[in-house]
Image (cartoon, rainbow, N blue to C red):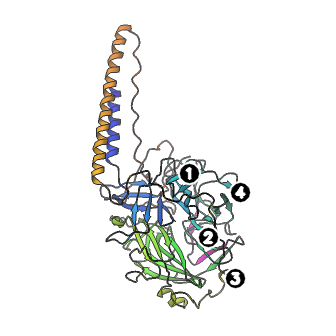
Amino acid sequence: MPSTRLSLLAAIALLSRSLQAKDPIQDFCRRWGHQTAQVDNKLYIDGGQVAWNPISTNPQNYTNTWLLYSDLNSTTQGFGQPNQYANLTKNATVPSVSGAVLWPDDVNKCFYQFGGEYQGAPPDFSFWTYDTRLDQWNESSPNSNVASLQRVAYGAGTSAEDFGYGYYFGGYMNNLTSPTWKGEQIATSNLISYDFTAGQLNNNSGPPDNVGRAEGQLVYLPASDGGLLVYFGGIEDPSRNGSSQAANMSTVHIYDISSNKWYTQQASGQVPGARRQFCAGATWADDQSSYNIYLYGGFTADGPGGYDDAYILSLPSFKWINVFNTGNGTNTQPFPHGACSANVVNRDQMLIIGGWFTNSSYTDCDAPNSQGQHNMNLGYNGEKNVLWDKWDPSATKYFVPTPVISVIGGGPTGGATMTKPSSWDNGDLSVYFGRQASFSARSATRVVPSGTATPSDTGKSKKTDVGAIAGGVVGGLAGLILILLLVLFCLRRRKKALKVKGEKNQGPSPPPPVELAATSPVQEMPSPVTTLMSTTNLQAQHYSANTLILHRHHPLTRMRSFQ
């Protein structure tokens, strides 16, 4: 009975999959390549990759298909980080990608998902909005100044919520971002902008050198008349043909939003080593005499190493300041990792989430009791008066820390005396940094619901209800067994009936009964390779969670070619 055996195997596969289901909170081990956005007092976490606890018995890496959030009004008992939840809506039609951006729109109570790459053959470009009040995803077709929009990944994203704009600079185009892409990946040189009010998604020119860039960081500063964007780090693809080199961390790119002009400025001081996929966020003194960009970690620009360090780039002095260091970019550092996220909250704290650990001998999970969350107190004014401190939901005031004051002068609330570099590369920059951005209060473009919808999935608290899970498993098993028995009963009856009919008619044997389709494999991260693979081998694969195989300066997703 081949059909019966196949039916039985399909049912067993379904049973096995149900038994292997993981809880994204309780079973968390590591997270990386994700994207985040803060709306109100929730920090949303979407996409990327995850590994389950413990790695020794869960060596695969999986695409994160959950939308999670950290409650910024809370803190975990004993671990000092925000409580995290996984009870929001996200169905299979919404992209679960890595290296994208979420643009938060606090006025309209939503965020917009742009870019990213898949772990398999990508669909056509799509643009999604998540409504935080209704717990609902919506796909839209934004207006654009180009005929055909393309997805890019591992560029640098930020938002200027004061003006209602999101930005995404550079990033890769490859056969995991575009279904029509052929050949090698390239780094792009354009600046994508999205107007929250008009719903306009535009493709704008990048720096005049036309160099492709990826895996760096972009931050927004409320300087100049309409704000500044500051970019640094990552890799450069000068010919935009797939070849790449490390970006010099002393070269800072500045985009003046009002004039639509790009500039470069050389920074000095304790310049960090070249790196990519680090995380960063910006804050500033009360009088805006200094803008301070905090950087953490990252991968070395070439090779398997990573960093476990922190720097501050203070502007407009353009001084790099080392504030935390445990090594020199080799795998001898205690916890070198990149592909993390960083979000500055109330200008005073920066939540750093996740990251891939490059040291293969380090197999521990990343702070599993707080789901890989780590907090920087940017003003060193937390419980312990140090950089790495517990999360404080009540912290709302930034003080310029002593390491910065010792370099640029002034005091905790501002008054910096070093307000320019040793020389300006372009005099326009001195004018821009001498001004503060002014803006009018934005109005919502929709009727914003007054409350927050109840999440459609269960799980009101961070703790998992073991009894509910046990009951669900038992109930699910019982239901599946009943279905299996019913299928087997129907198959036997049909076979008997067909046999009798065949004996009467002595005609040709009837076709076999319809078989149960095999369940799809667990969504796993494909095996990374250094050569392109044929499309004849497209089944899901995985690789060891404590090894990282580099491929052309992009450690996480250069795995498979679909041509």
Residue at screen point 41% across, 57% down: 86
* Outermost residue toward the front in this view: 450
Q: Position of residue 404 (x, y in %)?
A: 51, 86
N-term mark: 4 or 2: 4
Tell me the distance, in whole angstroms, between the alpha carbons under discs 1 and 4: 22 Å
Location of residue 171 (image quadrant): bottom right
Location of residue 528 (image quadrant): bottom left
Q: Which residues are magenta?
A: 242-259
For mark 3, give the secondary structure. Answer: helix
State left or right for residue 164 relative to residue 473: right
Local crowd size for mark 2, using a 10 Å CA cut-off: few (<14), some (14–19), many (≥20): some
Q: Are marks 1 and 4 in contact (CB under 8 Å)?
A: no
Tell me the distance, in whole angstroms, between the alpha carbons under discs 1 and 3: 42 Å
Is 130 in front, or is 401? 130
N-term mark: 1 or 3: 1
Is 186 in front, or is 409? 409
Tell me the distance, in whole angstroms, between the alpha carbons under discs 4 and 2: 23 Å
Where is mark 1, residue-wise? Answer: 138
For mark 1, give the secondary structure. Answer: strand
State left or right for residue 463 relative to residue 228: left
N-term mark: 4 or 3: 4
Where is mark 2, residue-wise? Answer: 162
Q: Is residue 439 above or below residue 55?
A: below
Look at the image and say whether residue 253 sits in the magenta stretch.
Answer: yes
Labels 2, 3: front one? 2
Is residue 546 visible in the rendered structure shown here?
no
Location of residue 5 (image quadrant): top left
Is 396 in front, or is 121? 396
Q: Tag on residue 524?
A: none
Labels 1, 4: front one? 1
Tell me the distance, in whole angstroms, between the alpha carbons under discs 4 and 3: 31 Å
Check disc 3 and give the amino acid type.
Answer: Val
